[in-house]
Image (cartoon, coloured by chain):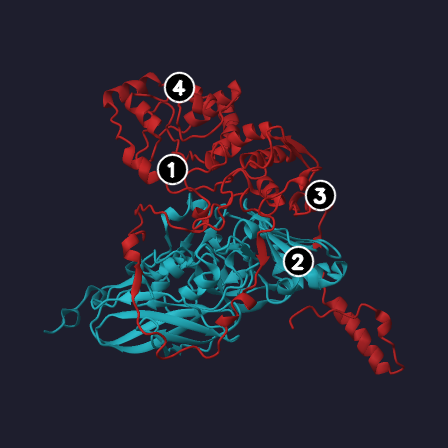
Chain colours: A red, B cyan
Amino acid sequence: DHFVQSVPDNPSMWVAPADSLFVSAANADSEAEAGAKFGLGREALPEEIAAWDLDVRPDGTGLPEGSGDVWTGDELFAEHCAVCHGDFAEGRDNWPKLAGGKDTLADKDPLKTVGSYWPYLSTAWDYVHRSMPFGNAQSLSADDTYAIVAYILYSNDLVDDDFTLSHENFLDVEMPNADGFIVDDRDTAEKHFWTDEPCMENCKESVEITMRAAVLDVTPEDESAEVEASATTEDQQEASAVSAGAEKGEVEVASVDAAAQTDAAESTTMAAPDPELVAAGEGVFRKCKSCHQVGDGAKNRTGPMLNGVVGAPAGHIEGFRYSKPLEKAAAGGLVWTPEELRAFLANPRGYMKGTKMSFAGLKKDEDLDAVIAYLQSFSQ
Amino acid sequence: EPDPLITEIQDWAAGLGDGVDATPYGLPIKFEDDVVRRNVEWLTADTISSINFTPIHALDGTITPAGCAFERHHSGAIELRKEDYRLMINGLVDKPLIFNYADLERFPREQHVYFCECAANTGMEWAGSQLNGAQFTHGMIHNMEYTGVPLRTLLEEAGLDAAGDLSDKWVYVEGADASSNGRSIPMEKALDDVLVAFKANGEALRKEHGYPVRLVVPGWEGNMWVKWLRRVEVMDGPVESREETSKYTDTLADGTSRKWTWVMDAKSVVTSPSPQAPITHGPGPLVITGLAWSGRGAITGVDVSIDGGKTWQPARLAAPGTDKALARFYLDHVWDGSEMLLQSRARDETGYVQPTKAQLREVRGENSIYHNNCIQTWWVRETGEAENVEVS
């Protein structure tokens, strides 16, 4: 038994006999007990504990006061979450789906979402508040988090559109799969795997090959291998099938007129951006960072890298898989002048229907100016 | 024909090699540049939240070199300086404490070799043979010698009297990265063999393995080995965090899911020959080798079959199995050049015998994702090439 050796709870059990040896032994014990402390570290301050101790438990312990409604959540979700999880929490590419999958858990490929699978609502609140949005964690207020979680519930048809989630009604929400879990029972359900005498000879009559990996051919051949498969794996389990393959097949290769490019680039030559505006833009760009990189060593991520984007022809990053409408616009000669970028960033999906960039848009003029100035500071 | 490599004076035998300072911290020689971690792109949306695989097909012995030991991140591998490192112990303790890195180095240390296996290792094989290589089917594992302080020591430093009866208490552990990757661990395990580690294989932890401090939870699924460990909270129940409800739970055929399936059951795999390590010589002496491990204790034996499980013979363990660590096995075989269906089967000190895939599916169905410890089959052809297959 490795369990903790604790001193007896009741010190009166330690009846001190006249035997001085025993007394000194007892003293030695208590000294050893005190000596077990090394006196290292310092006491944690209440503010420090409050800053890090953010976990929320199934019974609501740890939930801060606050509330948020579905419609506020819809807007926040579009701005902060939809780029990966889709407008309706249905998931994009290989990112997790948060909605759907009702009654699929016993199917061949169950769809495990907040609605279909998660047993506790506290888990969603805790994770959104502590670790999301991806690349900008802990930026959501308590009210924002309530609203986003309310929207996720709505996306799963678990609440109506007039629902407001708060610390007061949090425990009233019923999670469909709350009773869907059992504690590890391998010791009993798999007891037959404990057999001290495994078979060594004549263990079976015949052996046939029933499946071959080479038939599926999903093994990466080298670093640049691009493979698509409908395999079942951890993160793919709840993510959509790889859509890149289908898209790649449909996309026509854009041929941008070289002369047009040059003209456009020349026409957009302008003065160096205002340093103050650039600094402000760096802050605004945080919203973009979960998908886009800019600066030294910037690479394509969910979105293309943005070095030199201001003034460049649309779709100019080689090797990035743009959406079909963007490819079309690029073929039509679209150039990312500050004006075009401004219109796009103010309302991406309004400007370009079908864009993969699921970002709600920048509402403030000063944010638009700042982020474009910031991008302009990273010319090629 | 005399071998010119012998009869002619070679450059390396006449000229000079590198001086001692050519590589202040060395990397493998360029001829081994194929022995690297590999990613399977279609598995995940982005490498920042993904996993790669240890090239176990190309390694021998049991210790995994840190530079090719698999990585799993949920929000990317962060850079956290020792000077900026803080570890908080709070919750049901007598006095909540903050340790810095230098504090940790002043507690009595221990050293242990343990394997760390991702719960999803071999997960892609539930539905059938998919990936052609031991690296891809079994490479979410590494085995290192850790130096660190028992978590028990740190908990006792903060004092556990406030927690009262410890039998129903838990600790919640989380990392400093954006994902936090919080996990709940029963107090019994926390006080048993969990280590707060800062060295692996003698050197500082690598960035991708949680520098400067990670948790080591011997025998239990890798997700609980929280990297960049920043907080341990003593609690009277589990948090039921994202990583222990929506993930790392095992859905059975009827749609019910098992939770708290922390222990990694006994498992083994032949690492060579295997699809990435074909036989390149003809018939004759052949070293069949592989790895075996169990989260329940020491490996006591490994059997190898060359006929798809009809008959088995005991392999030789390179050294006696040790608690929750990789064991290396060898079968010194004389290959007759005919095709083989190679399998290995591990046994551990609790009497557990590694099951077949069919046995596992019988109990768990095909939707578990995690904890697939089935017997693996390699179909080795007359040419020496091998392929991942499933057999009846």
Q: Are circles 3 and 4 on residues that touch, CB within 8 Å?
A: no
- In-image side of A232 versus B29 (left or right): right
Rendered location of residue B9, percent (x, y): 16, 68
- In-image side of A316 versus A8 (left or right): left
Q: Residues within 10 Å of mark 3 (few under 14, many from 20)?
A: few
The answer as to whether the residues below labels 4 and 2 share one chain is no
Pick whichever of labels 3 and 4 is earlier in the sequence: 3
Residue designated by label 1: A300
- Residue closest to the eye, B278 or A204: A204
Q: In which quarter of the image is the C terminus of chain A?
A: top left
- In-image side of A27 versus A280 (left or right): right
At horizontal 87% and vertical 83% (from top left) the residue drawn is A19
Q: Residues within 10 Å of mark 4 (few under 14, many from 20)?
A: some
Residue designated by label 2: B170
- Which amino acid is tagged 1? Asn
Q: Distance between the residues labelled 4 and 1?
A: 21 Å
- Which amino acid is tagged 3? Glu
Depth check, mark 2 against mark 1: the one in front is 2
- Considering only vertical position in the picture, is A375 above or below A178? above
Residue designated by label 3: A47
